[in-house]
């Protein structure tokens, strides 16, 4: 009995000692260079010993005194509202002292979604070179949260995140491009510091950003979330995926004929048995079936004598799937999946006058291998470029089976909300910007219900029922079709637009700034600035045109359909001589390209073969040819109407 009491006493002493020496600790978002919301009380919180008194100072002046909870050591208080400005120092004093320096008060926005929200300025530097390289914005700051998930419970803090300022190129280049252009436009108009909390992960469906409360209305997704609460399930999947990937890579590496001396990337290769190939393009076998495995591509090109000794840039548009690239036998770059643009640096001593060789070892994982069309392929130095389109040669290194897709655990329901959103909810924000949806296009039917549920749930979590929520509708993507067809992307856009039924929401139309061959279009400036227009009107009360036309009603008038719109701004207009993108159908349900004409504040739509219209739609395609705008330059939103 005495031994049991002794052990219990030791445990209590260890526990008490742990708390007795606990230090004041702050959440990651309350750290140096932070931007906190101006003009409202700001929640402050952290951890210390149970019942420890914590005093908060702003620039040496006592602003609050609080006491940690006796159970969990969490303390909470509120900082009185502060005007825009800084820099300030926040000091937290308990058993220890913590200083947070270079703090500004301004407007704080949460940016979330998937890869088009994540895409950094570095990826668009060729399109906006002066802005990316030169535009220093010390009072635009970003708190970027790396991917992390938790299926068991909501986290109370995020890991490995810190504030950075847009004043230095090395920091600015990693900023979310959409967020930067959004913050830039807000700052130019409102003239306050702007902070962005970036909590976004590429490839994620909306379910991963929904809490357990939100998923209660979607039992199948909640069931899947619960399934991933098991560490054994997660570890088993990760292990199986890694082993499958390893076996695939080992096979192609050991069986690739190009990896055996004389290596196909070297210069002394006999190309007489290599096959001609035209870049850009994709490979198939003689039966037009895709080949997975490894293909090698070679291109000989002439390099000018006056450029010898200069560092060069090799641009290889977009390749499918993974490449290792050599110039004159020297490896200059490697990319492990298909999405990133290939832009490799060629060292100054590699190129020689006259004939040179580029060799690409290209892995095909899932039924495609080749060079994406409408992308740039060149090598150059300064203003001098050598075009790499046209004749190449290729040879098959090894054929292998289709590589099964990796299971992305972070895509599963609830995990990202718990780890990347819940820890932020005590922090007041001006509003939320959201760019997501591509990963839900295969099953768009209930996206609208999920989206509205998520918005309302986030507002509940922030205890702010009117928290502004602005979102980007999907951009145009995929090849343009010559005839009307059904579209998962169009349906998803319609589902997104349904969220406008909630108060304090706003939508940016993006069907005119995408790229058919790139799910990550480069024009993030238009997206960010359109979001800012929406915010300036909806949140800041500026009297500006912030939205393109949105159809409100369609009525039949004989064989014509008349469509009415809100948000006409200075009036309806077409970017070309006649309207494109309108379709009409009769009782057969078959849609035909329609004629359309602006009639004052309405659009008249008709087709000579449709006498009794039963449906009309506009921009109903993955990549629509559509050109209705208002005269203020903002595009009309896609729509469809059916008549009984």
Image: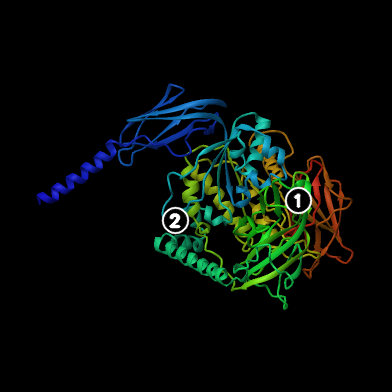
* Vertical side of 16 occupied by 551: above or below: below
Any mark on residue 454, and which? none
Q: Nearer the viewer, residue 572 or 336?
A: 336
Identify the image quadrant of the C terminus. Answer: bottom right
Q: Tell me the quarter of the picture where residue 322 sits.
A: bottom right
Q: Could you say which is closer to the camera, residue 378 or residue 200?
A: 378
What secondary structure is found at the residue carrying circle 2? loop
Drawn side of residue 17 relative to residue 465, left or right = left
| 626 with respect to 155 (left or right) | right
Q: Residue at position x 62%, y 48% from top?
A: 119
Q: Is residue 502 left or right of residue 521?
A: left
Which callout, 1 or 2, points at the residue further toward the start of the chain? 2
Local secondary structure at mark 1: loop
> Hey, which residue is sitting farthest bottom in the picture?
287
Q: Name the residue under label 1.
A: 512
Camera-nearest residue between 624 and 281? 281
The x and y percentages for residue 608 are: 89, 64
x and y percent of residue 277 in the render? 76, 67
Q: Residues within 10 Å of mark 1 (few under 14, many from 20)?
A: some
Query: Which residue was labeled with disc 2?
Result: 151
């Amino acid at each position: 009995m005495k031994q049991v009491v002794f052990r219990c006493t030791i445990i209590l002493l260890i526990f008490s000692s742990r708390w007795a020496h606990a230090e004041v600790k702050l959440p990651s978002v309350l750290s140096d260079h932070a931007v906190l919301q101006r003009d409202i009380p700001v929640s402050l919180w952290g951890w210390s010993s149970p019942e420890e008194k914590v005093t908060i100072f702003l620039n040496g002046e006592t602003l609050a005194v609080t006491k940690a909870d006796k159970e969990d050591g969490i303390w909470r208080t509120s900082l009185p509202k502060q005007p825009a400005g800084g820099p300030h120092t926040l000091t937290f004093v308990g058993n220890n002292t913590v200083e947070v320096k270079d703090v500004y008060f301004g407007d704080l926005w949460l940016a979330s979604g998937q890869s088009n929200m994540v895409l950094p300025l570095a990826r668009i530097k060729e399109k906006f070179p002066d802005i990316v390289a030169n535009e220093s914005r010390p009072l635009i700051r970003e708190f970027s949260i790396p991917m992390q998930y938790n299926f068991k419970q909501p986290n109370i803090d995020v890991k490995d995140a810190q504030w950075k300022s847009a004043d230095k190129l090395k920091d600015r280049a990693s900023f979310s491009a959409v967020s930067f252009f959004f913050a830039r436009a807000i700052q130019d108009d409102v003239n306050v510091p702007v902070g962005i909390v970036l909590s976004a992960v590429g490839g994620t469906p909306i379910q991963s950003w929904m809490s357990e409360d939100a998923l209660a209305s979607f039992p199948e997704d909640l069931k899947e979330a619960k399934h991933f609460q098991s560490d054994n399930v997660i570890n088993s999947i990760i292990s199986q995926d890694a082993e499958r990937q390893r076996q695939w890579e080992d096979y192609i590496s050991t069986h690739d004929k190009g990896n055996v001396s004389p290596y196909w990337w070297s210069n002394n290769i006999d190309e007489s048995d290599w096959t001609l190939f035209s870049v850009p393009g994709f490979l198939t076998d003689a039966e037009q079936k895709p080949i997975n495995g490894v293909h090698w591509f070679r291109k000989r090109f002439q390099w000018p004598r006056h450029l010898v000794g200069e560092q060069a840039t090799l641009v290889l548009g977009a390749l499918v799937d993974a490449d290792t690239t050599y110039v004159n036998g020297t490896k200059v770059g490697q990319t492990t999946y298909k999405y990133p643009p290939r832009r490799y640096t060629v060292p100054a001593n590699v190129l020689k006058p006259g004939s040179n060789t580029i060799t690409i070892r290209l892995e095909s994982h899932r039924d495609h291998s080749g060079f994406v069309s409408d992308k740039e392929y060149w090598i150059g130095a300064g203003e001098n470029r050598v075009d790499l389109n046209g004749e190449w040669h290729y040879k098959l290194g090894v054929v292998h089976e289709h590589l099964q897709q990796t299971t992305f655990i972070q895509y599963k329901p609830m995990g990202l909300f718990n780890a990347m959103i819940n820890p932020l909810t005590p922090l007041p924000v001006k509003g939320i910007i959201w760019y997501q949806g591509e990963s839900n296009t295969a099953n768009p039917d209930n996206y609208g219900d999920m989206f509205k549920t998520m918005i309302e749930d986030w507002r509940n979590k922030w205890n702010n029922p009117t928290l502004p929520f602005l979102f980007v509708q999907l951009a145009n993507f995929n090849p343009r079709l010559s005839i009307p067809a059904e579209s998962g992307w169009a349906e998803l856009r319609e589902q997104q637009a349904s969220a406008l039924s909630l108060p304090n929401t706003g939508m940016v139309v993006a069907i005119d700034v995408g790229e058919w061959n790139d799910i990550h279009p480069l024009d993030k400036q238009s997206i960010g600035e359109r979001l800012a227009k929406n915010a300036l009107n909806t949140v800041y009360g500026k009297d500006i045109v912030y939205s393109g036309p949105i159809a409100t009603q369609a009525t039949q008038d004989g064989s014509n359909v008349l469509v009415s719109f809100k948000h006409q701004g200075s009036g309806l207009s077409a970017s070309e001589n006649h309207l494109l993108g309108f379709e009409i159908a009769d009782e057969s349900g078959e849609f035909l390209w329609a004629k359309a004409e602006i009639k004052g504040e309405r659009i008249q739509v008709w087709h000579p073969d449709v006498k009794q219209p039963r449906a009309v739609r506009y921009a109903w395609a993955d990549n629509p040819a559509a050109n209705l705008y208002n005269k203020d330059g903002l595009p009309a939103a896609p729509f469809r109407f059916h008549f009984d």
